[in-house]
Amino acid sequence: MDRNQKADVVSALNAELNEVGVVVVTRNLGMTVAQSTVLRQKMREAGATYKVTKNRLARIALDGTSYTGLSDLLTGPVGLATSVDPVAAAKVAIDFAKTNDKLEIVGGAMGEVLLDAEGVKALASMPSLDELRAKLVGLLVAPATKLATVTQAPAAQLARVFNAYAEKEAA
């Protein structure tokens, strides 16, 4: 890679780090290309990304972001999983690490808050942003649904009574 390409990689990674909600640092312990491809595909499906970059370039890209504390974790063959949703990247990385012993969770960060491996696992156990939104909508809609059911019940009972009288007189 020449100097211009390195500058492009650093600026692209820096721009991405300024937009994401979480960064998970993983250690690659000899994953095959096929395994890395599966991991990237799962990340993409969850709305996250997984990149393996040179540690030196990643450290330079971390400068000027809220994730500067992660530079100590960048030793050896590491990869960065990022997502806007604070739970998505952590959840996919933890799930993949459970089934593949060649991926190790080193740590991560949510903004300026540094997380160790246990912190990333705790983050992954939380519901995602979409799940929380669905629960909130469900809570907001439930009272309206119950109110509609309660107000509709007396009218339905009256209709059944009138129908019974109509059938009785017709017979």
Image (tube, rainbow, N blue to C red):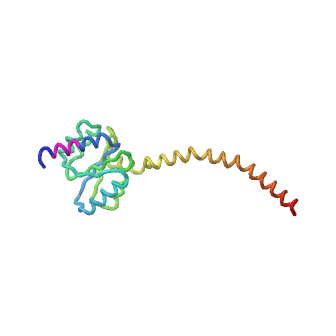
**Residue 121 at x, y = what percent?**
37, 50
State whether the magenta stretch is mostly helix, strand or loop: helix
- Residue occupying image coordinates x 20% and y 43%: 10
Q: Is residue 16 left or right of residue 1?
A: right
Percent coordinates x, y for residue 141 in the rendering: 58, 46
The residue at the point 23 percent across, 61 percent down is: 33
The C terminus appears in which quarter of the rendering?
Answer: bottom right
Question: Dividing the picture into quarters, in which one does residue 143 lie?
Answer: top right
Q: Is residue 167 left or right of residue 31?
A: right
Along the line of sight, the residue nearer the viewer: 24 or 12? 12
Based on the picture, tell me whether residue 107 belongs to the magenta stretch.
no
Viewer-closest of 160 and 97: 160
Left or right, 2 with respect to 48, comes to: left
**Residue at the limit of the structure toward the front, as seen here:** 170
Q: How many marks?
A: 0
Name above or below for residue 93 compared with residue 63.
below
The image shows residue 68 at horizontal and vertical percentages of 25, 39
On the image, the x and y values in percent for residue 42 come to 34, 57
Residue 152 vs residue 27, the one in the foreground: 152
The outermost residue toward the top is 64
Residue lying at 15% horizontally and 46% vertically, measured from the top left: 5
**Eyeballing the image, is 45 above or below 56?**
below
What's the magenta region?
Answer: 5-11
* In magenta segment, residue 8: yes
